[in-house]
Image (cartoon, helix red, strand yellow):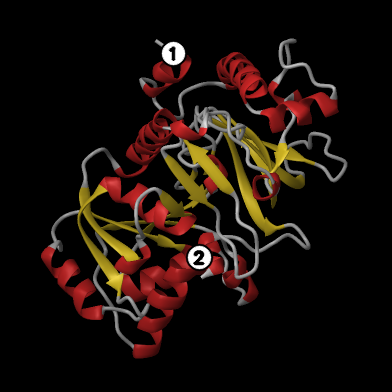
Amino acid sequence: MTELEQLLETPPYSLSAIDKAAVFNRTLAGMTQRHFQNCSEYRKMLNGLGFDPFSPFETEDLPFLPVRLFKEFTLKSIPDRAVHKTMHSSGTSGQQVSKIYLDKATALNQSKVLSKIMGALIGTKRLPMLVIDAKETVGGRGSFSARSAGIRGFSMFGRGVTYALHDSMKLDYEAIEKFATLHRDTPVFIFGFTSIIYQHFIQELQLSKLTLSLANATLVHGGGWKKLIDVSVDNNSYKGMLKDVAGIAKVHNYYGMVEQTGSIFTECDEGHLHSSIFSDIIIRRTDLSVAGAREKGLIQLISLLPESYPGHSILTEDIGELLGEDDCSCGKLGRYFKVYGRAAKAEVRGCSDVY
């Protein structure tokens, strides 16, 4: 049984810092060596840094790839014939987008890990699902935008999916009300992207002076806060508005990106984003040294899932703060943190921000 297969049999927030470090050091060493051998661009980068992947190293010493490199280079560790799916990051008109190449095994592991993480959040039973987006958003197979991939991925946890928006992105109040009435006595799952929910669900209900009864719902959202920060909407006020217009009290933000699909960071009941046993986070200062707890810096993400491309250690363009490790009052082990938004002059590329 591989290390990842063993982890899939383990509760996703159950490893202490010492146990997790041992797993990550072993697994990341093997991943780095394979990518070094099979991706010429990655090999050139490590050679340029003078980094030997066959010598022992700690996780924080593993070189990271700035996320923009996935726009500039074709980074894959598999032959063309093994590419099962190509993921595209968000990007506004004229911007380059990242291309992430998945083989079948990597795509399957992403789905399995996402299921483990979401199972810990909403349970393992598939729930009636409301997607706050348009059905048209879910495109064809083979190549996926980050937004369509997000909807497809999270739809695994729902059944009888209802789309809350017309293809014109106008609120389909009739469909949502029918959904709420049909499932008024059972738990339901709602998914959407942060600013799309705000613009096309919250604001449209506020403007039309309409309300909904979705008190039995768990709503999961992610994909960028740029537009909301611009209008002074923070996490607490966002949750308050959802409670006011639809009676939704269980609201969980998540943090993740297409460059590391599957190993997302979900928000606990205390409002903290958590790393699971499949991922980790490091905060780096402007000089790229490792920051301490309660110190803001650039977010570096570590994932055990990218086998088909060298995306296991990436430096994002987001600013975050490590809040603690293994001691969150929610009971989950692992590092927990807060995201403040994009670094100055970074491209806006969240799934919902781009829309």
Amino acid, disc 1: Thr
**Does residue 121 appear to the left or right of 300 in the view shown?**
left
Q: Residue at x 39, y 21 (%)?
A: 10
**Does residue 210 appear to the left or right of 293 in the view shown?**
left
Q: Residue furthest bottom?
A: 208
- Residue holding disc 1: 2
Position of residue 23 relative to residue 126, above or below, is above
Tell me if mark 2 has few (under 14), some (14-19) or many (20+) residues whose alpha carbon lies within 10 angstroms of its own.
many
Residue 246 point in image, percent of width and height: 31, 71
Amino acid, disc 2: Ser
Q: CA distance from mark 1 to mark 2?
A: 36 Å
Q: Earlier in the sequence, mark 1 or mark 2?
A: 1
Q: Is the Cβ of the residue at disc 1 closer than 8 Å to that at disc 2?
A: no
- Residue holding disc 2: 352
Tell me if mark 1 has few (under 14), some (14-19) or many (20+) residues whose alpha carbon lies within 10 angstroms of its own.
few
Hey, which quadrant is residue 24 in on the image? Answer: top right
Q: Residue at x 76, y 24 (%)?
A: 61
Q: Which mark is residue 303?
A: none
Q: Nearer the viewer, residue 95 or 295?
A: 95
Residue 269 point in image, percent of width and height: 45, 47
Say whether residue 333 is visible: no
Q: Residue furthest right?
A: 287
Hey, which quadrant is residue 177 in on the image? Answer: bottom left
At numbered mark 2, what does the secondary structure look like: helix, strand or loop? helix
At numbered mark 1, what does the secondary structure look like: helix, strand or loop? loop
Position of residue 126 relative to residue 107, above or below, is below
Position of residue 44 relative to residue 250, above or below, is above
Say whether residue 99 is visible: yes
- Which quarter of the figure is the N terminus placed in? top left
